[in-house]
Image: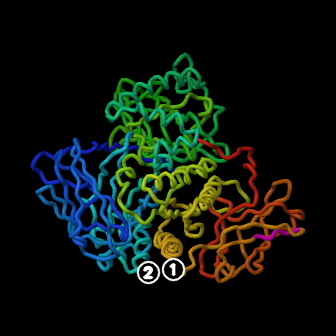
Amino acid sequence: MKLRHTLVSLLILSAGSVAPLGAQPRPAAIFTDNMVLQQRSTSAIWGEAAPGRKITVTPSWDPRHPQETRTDESGRWRVEIATPKAGGPYSLTISDGMPVVLKNILIGEVWLCSGQSNMEMRVADRVLGYEEEIAQAGSNPEIRLLHIDNTASPTPLREASVRHGGWQVCSPETLGDFSATAYFFGKELHRCLKVPVGLIESCWGGTVAEAWTSPEALLEIPAFARKVEHLKRIPASREERQRLFEKELVRWNDSLTRIDPGYAQGEPRWAMPEYDASTWQQVSVPGFLPEPQMQDFRGFVWLRRDVEIPESWAGETLTLSLAAIDDNDCTYFNGVEVGHGEGWLTPRRYTIPGALVKGGKATIAVRVMDTGGNGGIYGERRDVALVKSETERLDLGGAWSAKVSLRLSEAPEMPVNTATDVNYPSFLYNAMIHPLIGYGIRGAIWYQGEANVDRAEQYADLLPIMIRDWRRHWGYDFPFYLVQLANFMAVQQEAEESEWAELREAQQKTLCVENTGMAVAIDIGEAADIHPKNKPEVGRRLALQALASTYGKKVVSSGPLYEGYTIEDDRIRIRFSHTEQGLTTSDAEDPTGFYIAGADRQFHKAQALIDGNTVVVFSPEVPCPVAVRYGWANNPVVNLQNGAGLPAGPFRTDCWPRSNGQAPRGE
């Protein structure tokens, strides 16, 4: 199932209301009891009070040096305070004559934890060992958790929306709702460093990297220039944005009916009962459209089937249940539109008025718009039915007819509903990153990429731009550690082209950016679940990166990474970095997952032998090899690792475009 966001309503915050005269000063929502401030740093503290008031901020660790400022005409204030070495608990007093005291503050290490659903996946979401972990969470009170609410905005917000009232002490009551990857990362840091750890979770499932990047940074990529310019014209009001989208959608649909062959003079001829669909392809519903015919398809597919309506149902109002549709649909009953919907997770339930219902043959037709990845009507068979009552229903599962009508490349661009689309460029940066800028952090961890998997070439530029963007706004080059995409989908049987492999390659290229690192997860994914449960190991591998590179600990932080190759007659020798404790395999067998090709660019499964800190790759089918690939698949079978048990990252020695003739796509 593809990764796209669930269509939800956006929570748009105001820039902050001014505190009334005589009220206590109000710190921003991210400053609360139980917070952790970054040790030995300068951290900004800000908030609101009545305009023109003198604000005094006094830390209990340095009461002789309070910081003072005055609120501006909008009632805003901001100070910077120096923090000592790790310790606490402390308090922080903010006063304009009426003090507010923040209590139980710790000084330690603070990390920003961001990305999409694999970062958002909670400890309580049945990750490995979750019951025991939650039960024992009270033993880690020096780990503190701040959860930024899922919020989006077309303009930068001053105030973040936070869950649970702000910072929480790690406990059995608070841990379950927090990011599992972030927690296990922080737990390992706390175990090794023996200092308080603060974790800021700011992530949203199904989101793209450009949504987390500021507009000015996105201008470095020409493909985003038009949307960045459009940001300036997007209304602040969600209601106004919804009305604008509905008008644009009507115009778009009208334009489609003029070019989609499923229509004639604006009428849906492919939905009419008299239309002959006998030559259409047969597909199974529920189920995604079949491979390989629909591989890499993006566009419009019509699905239809006939059903025999009992005479006793004539004139009765019916419910048409179509489970879920990936992505959008327009649905017809005997050529009359009975509903349309958006979003691949949204169940479709359409009412068929009694005036349309007659006994005998009826035709149900669905025009499906698929924007990439899988597409079609999917879900449980019991949810695909024509329903009269709880006891009277017609099963619509089974064979349907299908026909492609139009590719997206042939259609006008669909308007974006900026009232609900959280993936619009910069929307999440504006609401979930911008309000945090200035809060002192040691670094960031990032678990994202699935939602950009069809644009790997662009992602190789986009992710470094986002990293530099965040650093520029914070004012220093903090460490940034990412998780490479795990193995997923059907296990590899033969050499294959793979968008997931291309995205992993783009992630590895990010390591050229200074002060970055990557946790390889190619061995701990799950074929049937894009959200693998082994988050403790993901968090540990991220922590190893931080412990080695940020904190200078002598730990092995990475598995073998491809460094280069040489051709030796009928063999290719691969060199690796990070071969600490020697190259080995997880199963004590020869290395697997290697494929080799000659000048014809046809890859064959290869034999491989470990020779010191190199691997020699060969195949009798390729006497003159020129290229090697390792782990180059959605879900490869691989076993190479170093002596510390950390897996080798997937790689290729070539830079050939896909064998199906498609080069990696941009936006």
Quadrant for the C terminus, please.
top right
Foreground of the two, 615 or 434: 434
Residue 552 at x, y percent in the picture: 51, 77
Q: Is residue 248 toward the left or the right of residue 290 in the image?
A: left
Label 1 neighbour load within 10 Å: few <14, some 14-19, many 20+: some
Between the C-alphas of marks 1 and 2, the distance is 9 Å
Q: Is residue 600 toward the left or the right of residue 96 in the image?
A: right
Residue 294 at x, y percent in the picture: 63, 43
Residue where numbered disc 2 is placed: 192
Label 2 neighbour load within 10 Å: few <14, some 14-19, many 20+: few
Mark 1 near mark 2, Cβ–Cβ under 8 Å? Answer: yes
Residue at 56% from the left image edge and 54% from the top image edge: 464
The residues colored magenta run 570-574
Vertical arrangement, residue 274 with respect to residue 662, above or below? above
Q: Amino acid at mark 2?
A: Cys
For residue 137, the mark is none
Task: Pick whichever of labels 1 and 2 is earlier in the sequence.
Answer: 2
Residue 406 at x, y percent in the picture: 61, 31
Tell which residue pokes out farthest to the front in this image.
64
